[in-house]
Amino acid sequence: MANFEIPTEQWAQVVEKSGGPAIYKKIPVQQPGPDEVLINVKFSGVCHTDLHAMMGDWPLDTKLPLVGGHEGAGLVVAKGSLVKDIELGDPVGIKWLNGSCLACSFCQQADEPLCPHALLSGYTVDGSFQQYAIAKAAHVARIPASCSLEEVAPVLCAGITVYKGLKESNVRPGQWVAIVGAGGGLGSMAIQYAKAMGLHAIAIDGGSAEKAESCKKLGAAAYVDFTTSSDLVTDVKAATPDGLGPHAVLLLAVQEKPFQQATEYVRSRGSVVCIGLPAKAYLKAPVFDTVVRMITIKGSYVGNRQDTAEALDFFSRGLIKVPFKTVGLSELQNVYEMMREGKIVGRYVVDTSR
């Protein structure tokens, strides 16, 4: 078992008031409780949720001051007395679900993300935009030793979330799924998970030729640009061989409009799976169509521990490549600005050492 020298202070990005900005400063290193581990975070992906958390966009109070981040990959450097199945030096991941009670009816049925006592990394507890972070040992992702911590970081939220959404859609190999927001961090992985699961992906996005090229390179069977399409519904349906539309839609968008359009082009008996969380947005669908075409509209949240293991297994076998750019943790606020302006293709990862 390795021994690690743990400092008393560390660099972190701290949101001191709702609306931001994130401030790069030194804060104390915490000690893990009996059922917790202390992780030396090496890399952390930056998710749109982190921006929502800083801006106070959602009807759920954040802790303040707050260290954001929930895609942290690193090594266990200390553990509590009750932790028996993790060793010091093990590579692990910090996910959105930092901890749950493990005793309620949801936890007992493998729906830990729905636990009423859930702890959320970078939202209700401090997350991974710091060099040393605390997490409940039962919920940290077990990262295969063969994986690069830099490359795997975005899988810990974006990858697990879209993999779970594809499972929730009930699409089967050979069927078609539309991925709305396909050029972003979640979308780029959703295309690859869909392909690896034997599905045909229709990528829907817009705004740059770079997004179209990226989606096709990652394995999308078709690309529809919503900014240039004169009739999005017709174009999405036409992308399927029989013209009846995709069997499912994964909504990863951060605007409301795509959520209102999806039921128009999904095929009868298809599923519309809502994953993106536009601030103050609502769903609207015609009741008649929804009933007579037997359309399912559902939400999909983050994955459970089994979903996490499965999503990481796809990655460890080389089936998922994350398009990412790495910058120093000190540059996080610049990433947020690019995110606000819709300029990010793929995912940004922050290196906590700089």
Image (spheres, grey):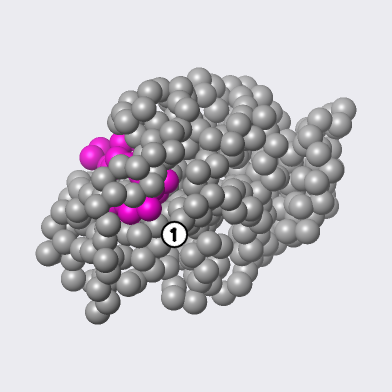
Quadrant of the snapshot with the N terminus? bottom left
Please tell me which residue is depicted at 27% across the width and 57% down the height of the picture.
7
In the drawing, does residue 265 fall left or right of residue 121? Answer: right
Q: Give the x, y percent position of residue 317.
A: 57, 74
Disc 1 marks which residue? 42
Quadrant of the image occupied by residue 143: bottom left
Residue drawn at x 34%, y 71% as measured from the top left: 90
Q: State the image coordinates of residue 31 (x, y, percent, origin top left).
A: 19, 53
Q: In this view, does 103 lie to the left or right of 286?
A: left
Q: Where is residue 48 in the image (x, y as percent from the top left)?
A: 54, 38
Image position of 316 with respect to 99: above or below: below
Does any portion of residue 338 appear in the rendered image? Answer: yes
Instruction: Pick whichever, 262 or 123, lies toward us.
Output: 123
* Front-most of residues 188 and 250: 188
Look at the image and say whether residue 253 sits in the magenta stretch: no
Q: Is residue 247 visible?
A: no
Q: In this view, does 70 lie to the left or right of 239?
A: left
- Give the camera-side residue of 133 and 136: 133
- Secondary element type, mark 1: strand
308 horizontally vs 169: left or right: left
What count of labels does the image hold? 1
Q: What residue type is labelled 1?
A: Lys
Boundaries of the magenta span: 116-140
Rendered location of residue 296, percent (x, y): 55, 38
